[in-house]
Image (cartoon, rainbow, N blue to C red):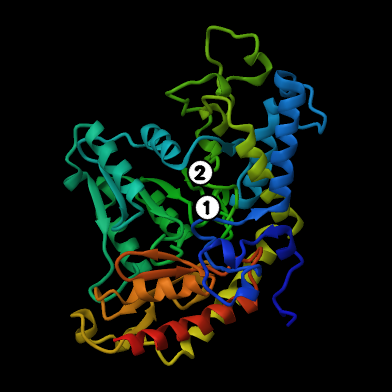
Amino acid sequence: MTSTLELPLRKEFLLPINGEVGANRLWNESDKPCTYLCGNSLGLMSKRSKELVEEEMSVWATRGVIGHFDHPHKRGWVGLADHARSYLAEIVGANENEVACMGTLTANLHLMMDSFYKPTSERYKILCEAKAFPSDQYAFTSQAQAHGLDPAEAVLELHPRPGEFCLREEDILQVIEQEGPSIAVVIFSGVQYYTGQWFPMHSITQKAKEQGCICGWDLAHAVGNVPLSLHEWHVDFAVWCTYKYLNSGPGGIAGLYVHEKWNDSLKPKYAGWWGHDPSTRFAMPPKFSPIEGAGGFQQSNPSILAIASLLGSLETFKRAGMMAPLRKRSIALTNFLEKLLFQSKHFVSLKDISTKYQEGQGKPGFTIITPHDSKDRGAQLSLLFLPLGTGVMQKIFESLQSHGVIGDERQPDVIRLAPVHLYNNEADCETAAKFLDIAFDKFAVSI
């Protein structure tokens, strides 16, 4: 079948095969590609990434330290992060000097929080979504504690309305309006990791600025997934990892953004030599002279192998035309998967979830807690399995994996499926929907 959504990019990625991912399908399918719908957790390896990493390994083997300045492929290691930075700036909608390719997500978050979170007796709260990714919650708590504050008072978490799973835009804006004078930093996830909700980033940022708050974003699940315009939206800072939709590999190098309006007034507090002016960096001067903008926050020289892996994927993004055409394709794919799931006899509408489901009763089924409107979500659909807390999700997850359908589980009741615009297609969506129904049918027989 030739997919109407197909781009000539799938062949540029290495898809795991059924026999290597724990699938238990017919022997003649063991060497076929699995149905990989887990790019929201770990993106697939691009062939270009593999090629670049192997090239850098060869340069290391043949040139050693000389590769920093004299590189056979004109990618001297001293400037390799700058190659990635230009692509990242385009993907997040920023100027190049506002972006740095560096560190890891939570380390970068702490750097930014330490720079921007300056609590006073009047303005001291950190506003975030309840059930943010745990690493973010740990960071907010520790930042409050580092300033001698009680996190129970300093960290203000927004919960969805009773019976709902996602935050409403009007509720977020209302809290910022009401609590604004006491809020130091507003920081949400661009895309919420559990529900897949894409927060209204522009309106939240605007409202935060109106109230005199700093506004930052954790873009771990948003970068490479949805279009971003950080500079135009006047976002103060943002951080992200690159191993999800940017396909940089497990634990890949991360990134950060600082709006250029802070260049004159905000200097790195924790200086490192890689943030020093490159023109005098190797003269080893005793006084730190930071690069203007986000680059000044760099500390140690970055992992070349990690950057090479990221760079391979970023080059693939560039060949695809970056986020505008990819977003169009993402919407079509995610809508198609949702349509197939709606047609399942095991699907239960959110509005039809009764009290008995919540109390562990009722026939096994699933619903979708990700917003239906494409403007409120990226590539991810989060499936909630019913009745809650009865182990239905785990049984379905194991069955899907046995058929080579790879999503990811979030205990106790959610499976996340993400048809990624760079390498997934309609056939993947059809396979996932088919084996979901088969899993339910098998489960029904076993109970």
Q: Which mark is residue 251?
A: 2
The quarter of the image holding the N terminus is: bottom right
360 displayed left or right of 433: left
Camera-nearest label, 1 or 2: 2
Q: Is residue 313 above or below residue 327?
A: above
Q: Which residue is mark 1?
A: 233
Q: Residue at x 69, y 28 (%)?
A: 77
Farthest right residue in view: 72
Residue 24, position as x, y percentages in the image: 52, 72
In the image, is residue 223 above or below residue 3?
above
Q: Earlier in the sequence, mark 1 or mark 2?
A: 1
| Helix, strand or loop status at disc 2 | loop
The answer to whether marks 1 and 2 mark residues whose Cβ atoms lie closer than 8 Å is no
Q: Is residue 84 above or below residue 377?
A: above
Q: Nearer the viewer, residue 240 or 363?
A: 363
Q: Quadrant of residue 154?
A: top left
